[in-house]
Image: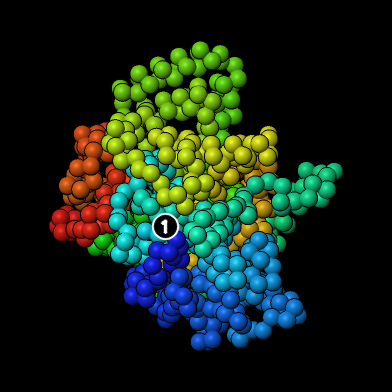
Amino acid sequence: MCGIVGILTYSGRGTVERPTLERMRDVMVHRGPDGGDLWISQDRKIGFGHRRLSIVDLNVAATQPMRNEDGSVVITFNGEIYNHARLRPELVARGHQFRTDHSDTEVLVHGYEEWGLDGLLERIEGDYAFGIWDETKGVLSLARDRIGVKPLYFAYINGRFAFASEMKALVQHPDFSPEIEPYAMYHYLSYLTTPAPLTMMRGIYKLPAGCSLTVSRSGEAKMSRYWDATPGRGIDPRETKGLSERALEDFYIKGIQDRLRDSVDKRMMSDVPMGVFLSGGVDSSTNVALMSEFSSRPVETFTIGFSDYQHLNEFDSAHAIAKKFNTNHHEISIQKKDMIDYLPKMIHSQDEPIADWVCIPLYFVSKLAHDAGMKVVQVGEGSDEQFCGYSGYMAYLNLYHKYWSPFRKYLPQPAQHLAAGTAKLLSGMHPRLPIYADIIDRAARSREHFWSGAMVFPDLMKSQLVNPAGIAAMRADRDAGVAGLLDPDYLELDSYNVVHSFLGPLDSQFPGSDALTRMIHSEFRLRLPELLLMRVDKIGMSESLEARVPFLDHKLVEFSMDIPEQWKTKGGEPKYLLKKAVEGLIPDDIIYRKKMGFGAPMSDWMRSDFGRAIRTSVLSSGLMRRGLLNVGYIEKLFDWHFKGRMDTSLYLWTIYNLTAWYDLWVDRKEVDTSQLSDAAA
């Protein structure tokens, strides 16, 4: 994994300046501490930068930016192409000359020459973000991998189109003026993250997962979706036609086993040490078991816990797996003071707010792996999303089948609206009630029952938190180059528009999809690529550590998307098929123990002096003076939490991440933890 950056000038607006490109590149040195290079065209109208984390083909010949034989095609690339060794012989047979021994980057260069962008994206398997300049066509092409494991941001800056692996690189351009994007902020308060292509920084956008973007010499951009997590790709209906229930279950189980084993095998591709994050749950334990099959040396495993909240730890399960598979095991325990000391780096590393406190333990386990000499780890993200592993998913499904559908089917519309209105009136009686009133309101308005597995503020609470007039006052014209790339409905104060933009097309193309399939599709468009995978990328790469996600191999995802809801949750068992698929591979007591999840004791921390210091930090933020948020309501949320009336720690952490981000990136003030450190003393 690396850091990439590029600038294309258009409309006669100057040239690419080397110092600017270097500054943008080197603010991402953490993504590539092993070296960096630049390429600027002869006419200085386009330039690429690259920071290298050497993982595959460590030879200097594999340095980027990389060019083809005649220099007409240039690439800067972040990621891994797992099938590059299979594609190379085909390209050699067609006459392409390779300078490197086994660089996957060079396969991209010649693959683009041979097949074009669409043909290349159809053939490659991996996790990637890249920019390719085609001098002959005068076209810049960007692409982000199917699932969204790697990030890619872009912006129009005073007659220049710029792109980078991280937002902080684009902010370094001297002509960029940082400002908050209020509509992104509004959606962030719903989803813990911002929906692509919006980001929290006005004027900076992110390429959605599974999309490509082409930009002409004139700056005109066109975005295309080349892959999506939808049914109809993974299982030929003829393969399952006429199968008995037992035979069908066996077919699903074997399909999962074969694809998962192949996925882990592919992701063992490395010329440097690699390990695995081990929580002791099903997903990480499966990674360890399968990695052990393909490794000639003991697998390196890494586990984290809390010294002051030991009931949250999973050390015993992790130890059992480490012992069974004879791993070289490492572990670390952290406490509140460690978290406080880390906060300034966290806000900087996140790039834009990622209001998931898993970022805290994720950093310390990433540092543990880095300090042990690792450059690559395998992680378990994506398993729960595909196979329904969360208790929250099961609760939503139960809600949908037992209450939601009957409510909408049997209750007349006037009665539905009356129920919603009554619930809204009663919601003021207790701070927990707006959540339930919001669900009833969705039903009455024919909206989705499930929007995301990471909902924060429901609409009724957000209406008390957000000042619409303040947001309306900041409405601004978009750069002409963004026209057609950004759904105009995203610039409305209604986060349902985001979900509808995913599920509307799904329902048109695949009518009658079951409730779980629709939920999973939504997760693959928002929560997974823009929250879960971004926390892994940004936090892991802050320690120069690449994370690979075997459960998110696109062939496994395509297969799982064709498995109906009743099989993924058979007998009311979350993750039923995956658990069956790994029986015999890992111990049953690991498979069927209660899921704990990877988290932090934030609720308790927020009730200590730390929470009061956070309150001071939030209320003194420059964002509070912008008129976008209701300060009185925020004070009420703190008061409810301190008095134990309601656990509002997630709401408060979401607001803190937002205000700390604003102070650092918009007001350009360093995150002050002096009061927080005093609170931890």
What count of labels does the image hold? 1
Quarter occupied by residue 21: bottom left
Lateral position of residue 636 relative to residue 46, left or right? left
**Where does label 1 land, which residue?**
155
Residue name at image x 50 percent, y 60 percent: 218
Q: In the displayed structure, would residue 441 be above or below residue 265?
A: above
Q: In the displayed structure, would residue 320 be above or below residue 612?
A: below
Lateral position of residue 383 relative to residue 615, left or right? right
Quarter occupied by residue 69: bottom right
In the displayed orientation, state which residue is furthest to the front: 12
Identify which amino acid the numbered label 1 is placed on: Ala
Q: Secondary structure at mark 1?
A: strand
Q: Position of residue 188 (x, y in %)?
A: 38, 44
Residue name at image x 36 percent, y 55 percent: 352
Q: Nearer the viewer, residue 307 or 671?
A: 671
Lateral position of residue 681 relative to residue 65, left or right? left
Q: Position of residue 561 (x, y in %)?
A: 66, 48
Q: In the displayed structure, would residue 78 be above or below residue 257?
A: below
Q: Position of residue 587 (x, y in %)?
A: 59, 60
Label 1 crowding class (10 Å Cα cut-off): few <14, some 14-19, many 20+? many
Q: Is residue 555 visible?
A: yes
Residue name at image x 52 percent, y 55 percent: 221
Q: Position of residue 272 (x, y in %)?
A: 51, 80
